[in-house]
Amino acid sequence: MDNQNEWLALATTLKLAGITTLILLIIGTPLAWYLSKLNTRFKVIIEALVALPLVLPPTVLGFYLLLLLSPTSGPGKFIHDLTGTSLAFSFTGILIGSVIYSLPFVVQPLQKAFEQLGDNLNEAGAMLSAGPIDRFFNITLPMTKASFITAASLGFAHTVGEFGVVLMIGGNIPGETRVLSIALFDQVEAMNYSTAHWLAASLLIGSIVMLTLVYLLNFKSEKTIIVRSIS
């Protein structure tokens, strides 16, 4: 990859994936905790809305987000009137789309981990006068560390591979909204297969490495739990 635009696309992709993952962990953790404790008929509706990006075509999600972020209607118009900037075709716009599109990849692993953890340990901590924040960082987080790593890895990897949502919301602006997947499409469309091979191989190898690390961490975590239970 010797083209400056491709390096810019790589930088934009890593920046987008990193910030998206951080935001998803911040908002996804309390949402996953809430869903793990929720016991009403409305739970399935909320879970369905969170999981919607898993089955909804990316272009459909991108289209409706583009309408919402447009400076002529909805929240996009409010932001444009307030700040004079447009969310559509901007890095902020694709960041919003990425957070929504990758949300289930972070929430679902955390929700399952919280459900499997149960309430006994936290209730014991409460009996010892430990506050909610203390219980989270000293009980919940250590016990579900592997799930947090999995959630972060999946959120990051999924954001790196985005195409339809980013293209619909952000277009193809070098240094702003042009990510690796769009750069790959451009190179294939221009029949520059040599550069396309480099881009495709980078995405492929990165995905394999990320998934391998996730499965390795999960395997070590399960092995540790088995050893502790035996001892």
Image: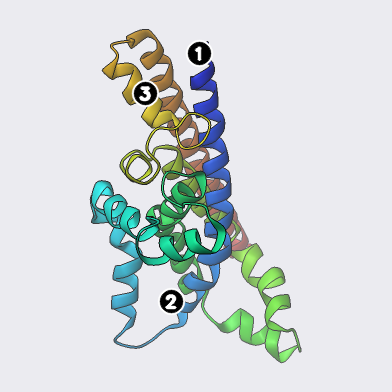
Judging by the rendered image, the residue that carries numbered circle 1 is 3
Q: Looking at this rendering, what residue extends furthest in the right direction?
A: 129
* Mark closest to the chain's N terminus, 3 or 1: 1
Say which residue appears at 47% left-offset and 43% top-offset.
215
The crowding category of the residue bearing disc 1, from other C-alpha atoms within 10 Å (few below 14, some 14 to 19, many at least 20), is few
Judging by the rendered image, the residue that carries numbered circle 2 is 35
Residue 218 in the image: x percent, y percent? Answer: 51, 49
The image shows residue 192, relative to residue 53, as above or below, that is: above
Q: Is there CB contact under 8 Å for labels 3 and 1?
A: no
- Circle 2 or circle 1, nearest the eye: 1
The image shows residue 32, relative to residue 17, as above or below, that is: below
* Amino acid found under the numbered disc labelled 1: Asn
Residue 139 in the image: x percent, y percent? Answer: 67, 72
Q: Nearer the viewer, residue 89 or 21?
A: 89
Q: Using the numbered discs, state the Cα–Cα distance from disc 2 to disc 3 in whole angstroms.
A: 38 Å
* Amino acid found under the numbered disc labelled 3: Leu
The quadrant the C terminus occupies is bottom right
Helix, strand, or loop for circle 3?
helix
Q: Is residue 64 left or right of residue 77?
A: left
**Looking at the image, can residue 223 be seen?**
no
Q: Determine which of the numbered discs, if any, sits on residue 184 in the image.
A: 3
Residue 56 in the image: x percent, y percent? Answer: 24, 55
